[in-house]
Amino acid sequence: MDISSIAKEYKLYVDTSVLMHSAPDQFFNIIKKSLLQSKNKLFFHKSVKEYELKNIAKGDVQKKDLEKYGFEKAKIIAKNKQKYAKKGLEILEDFKKEECGQGFQTGKDIGAADNNYVVVFTKLRLKYKLCLLSNDIGLSKEIYKLNKSESSEFDKAGNRLIKGIKVVRID
């Protein structure tokens, strides 16, 4: 199934890692076109925009990069991340402006976007087909595992209750 079909059939959620890709334009243009045609939306947790992308866009050198690479290389990494974060923010604003993107928040903010996406996917998997756009391998595996459940995957008649969960990444 290609991304334009997924955008039409699934509720799409986006993680910071995909928005920080070095060349996201073509990927997100295809998604936007499909969402506009199908009147669907791209959903992003408020922590993606309000905390993660905005903080990275400041261009501050991160302690882990400083310890691992030294100051000069950490500065270059911060500058690149800053550029990618700004582009990610532009993408979210463009989707909102075109009315095919929408921020959301969970009832109780439980920290990083990853935690919030696990809660949302667990809650909505019986109601909708869901797709997470993420390059975060750990989060992707955790979300994909929600396709299975020993207690709620099937009803008593043997009908599958979980509508379907996909994870898509940009290479």
Image (spheres, grey):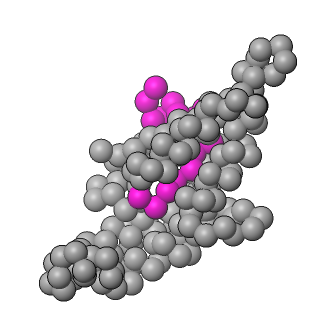
Question: Residue at image x 62%, y 51%?
Answer: 118
Q: Is residue 54 left or right of residue 154?
A: left
Toward the front, the furthest residue is: 150
Depth check: 82 or 94 in front? 82
| Number of on-image labels | 0
Q: Quadrant of residue 70?
A: bottom left
Q: Is residue 10 magenta?
A: yes
Query: Can the viewer see residue 95 in this picture?
Result: no
On screen, residue 107 above or below 66:
above
Coordinates of residue 2 in the picture (x, y in percent): 43, 30
Q: Is residue 113 left or right of residue 110?
A: left
The range drawn in magenta is 1-17
Q: Is residue 96 magenta?
A: no
On screen, residue 41 above or below 52:
above
Toward the right, the furthest residue is: 156
Coordinates of residue 159 in the picture (x, y in percent): 76, 17
Coordinates of residue 52 in the picture (x, y in percent): 48, 72
Q: Is residue 37 left or right of residue 119?
A: left
On screen, residue 39 above or below 61:
above
Question: Residue at image x 49%, y 51%?
Answer: 139
Toward the top, the furthest residue is: 157
Question: Residue at image x 68%, y 51%?
Answer: 120
Query: Can the viewer see residue 88 in this picture?
Result: yes
Question: Residue at image x 25%, y 81%?
Answer: 66
Q: Which quadrant: the C terminus?
A: top left
Q: Is residue 128 left or right of residue 29?
A: right
On screen, residue 158 above or below 12:
above
